[in-house]
Image (cartoon, grey):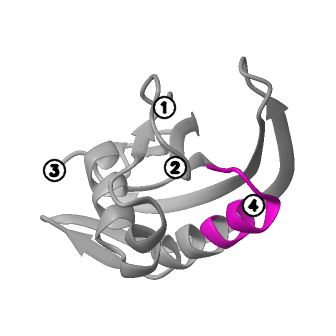
Amino acid sequence: MDFQTAVRARLIADGAVAAIVAARVYWVERAKGSDLPAITIQVISDPRPAHLKGLDGARGTRVQLDCWALSYGAALALARAAIAALLDPATVSGKRFGNARVDGQRDLSETVADGTLVHRQSVDLILWHVGD
């Protein structure tokens, strides 16, 4: 299983996250017309550490989780649940993750085309994992 598929699988398999978003977890962009709350994920940086014999097996990939909701409190609750789902080591279909680290969290909002104010918690995480 690749990194992107495993990260999404971890989020939607978590009971607290699934209770809020069901399977509305998307890479990069929410599906047009999708309901809220929802999560979008994107890779911010994915360094490939190397040594004299080639690439290291383990690496820390920085991902940004954007937790979208119609209220500030709902966005914050979703961010907390998503962080908890990814912090501890786990193995998903053979994809191994180590401890994650929160590297920042921001309050954001935007007004969408119909005039609705949408709240967003943007969370940067360093996810340690082995392989692609």
Q: Is residue 44 above or below residue 104?
A: above
Q: Which mark is residue 103?
A: 4
Residue topped by disc 3: 1
- Residue 130: which quarter of the image? bottom left
Q: Residue furthest front?
A: 114
Mark sitting earlier along the chain (2/1): 1
Residue for point 70% across, 50% down: 70
Closer to the camera: disc 4 or disc 1? 1
Say which quadrant the C terminus sits in. top left
Q: Amino acid at mark 4?
A: Asp
Looking at marks 4 and 2 on the same chain, the residue that comes earlier in the sequence is marked by 2
Which picture quadrant has residue 17? bottom left
Circle 4 residues within 10 Å: few <14, some 14–19, many ≥20? few
Assess disc 2: are there few (<14), some (14-19) or many (≥20) residues with their C-alpha within 10 Å of its C-alpha. Answer: many
The residue type indicated by label 1 comes to: Arg
Disc 2: which residue: 38
Look at the numbered discs 2 and 1 and tell me whether their residues touch, using CB distance below 8 Å.
yes
Q: Residue at x 70, y 60 (%)?
A: 75
- Alpha carbon separation for disc pair 2 and 3: 23 Å
Q: Which residues are magenta?
A: 67-78
**Amino acid at the residue labelled 2:** Ala
What is the C-alpha distance between the residues marked 2 and 1?
Answer: 8 Å
Would you place residue 118 above or below residue 105 in this image? Answer: above
Q: Residue at x 51, y 42 (%)?
A: 41
Residue indicated by mark 1: 30
Q: Secondary structure at mark 3?
A: loop
- Lower position in the chain sequence, tag 2 or tag 3: 3
- Mark nearest the camera among 1 and 3 is 1
* CA–CA distance in space, label 1 to label 3: 22 Å
How far separated are the C-alphas under marks 3 and 4? 25 Å
